Amino acid sequence: MAVLEGGVRHVLPVRGLAGRPCGLVPIDGPCRASTAGLRWDVQDAELRFGALVSTSNAVEGAEVEVYATGPLLWTLALEE
């Protein structure tokens, strides 16, 4: 787990972890997010409790890119 600061483009190295479950959870209220490198990428989607929260996604590539307007909790299963 890691907290990703809002307003920053994050590039997360995940080489060799394709197919592993991951998620992005807003931790300070709703925010808008865009991703690349996930099974179900989002583009300028609003993440918020009671609506869209990305808790059941999966890694697809060697890196994941995340940009969000607010802080997110990044989760990644390292073991099967």
Image: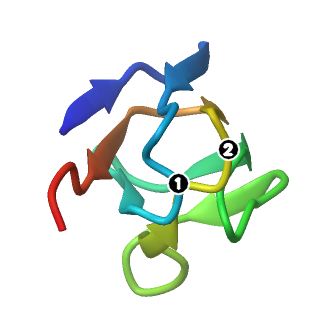
User: Which residue is the site of mark 2?
Assistant: 61
- Pointer 2: residues within 10 angstroms few (<14), some, or many (20+)? some
Q: Residue type at mark 1?
A: Ala
As displayed, is residue 65 above or below residue 5? below
Q: Which residue is mark 1?
A: 18
Q: How many marks?
A: 2
Q: Are marks 2 and 1 in contact (CB under 8 Å)?
A: yes
Whole-percent x, y for residue 78 in the image: 21, 49
Where residue 12 appears, x then y in whole percent? 51, 24
- Disc 2 marks which amino acid? Gly
Give residue 76's mark.
none
Kind of element beneath mark 1? loop
Within 10 Å of disc 1 (Cα), the crowding (few <14, some 14-19, many 20+) is some
- The Cα–Cα distance between marks 2 and 1, rounded to whole angstroms, is 6 Å
- In which quadrant of the rendered image does the N terminus lie? top left
Taking the spot 52% from the left edge, 31% from the top edge, the residue there is: 15
Q: In percent of the image, x 23 and y 57: which residue is there?
A: 77
Q: Nearer the viewer, residue 67 or 49?
A: 67
Q: Is residue 11 left or right of residue 71?
A: right
Please report the residue visible at 76 percent of the width from the left and 60 percent of the height from the top. 42
Q: Can you give x and y, in whole percent of width and height, for residue 40 in the image?
A: 70, 70
Q: Secondary structure at mark 2?
A: loop
Q: Quadrant of the C terminus?
A: bottom left
Q: Which of these two is toward me, 24 or 22?
A: 22
- Residue at far bottom of view: 50
Q: Which sits earlier in the primary sequence, circle 2 or circle 1?
A: 1
In the rendering, at what x and y percent does residue 60 appear?
65, 55
Q: Residue furthest top?
A: 8
Q: Residue at x 54, y 78 (%)?
A: 52
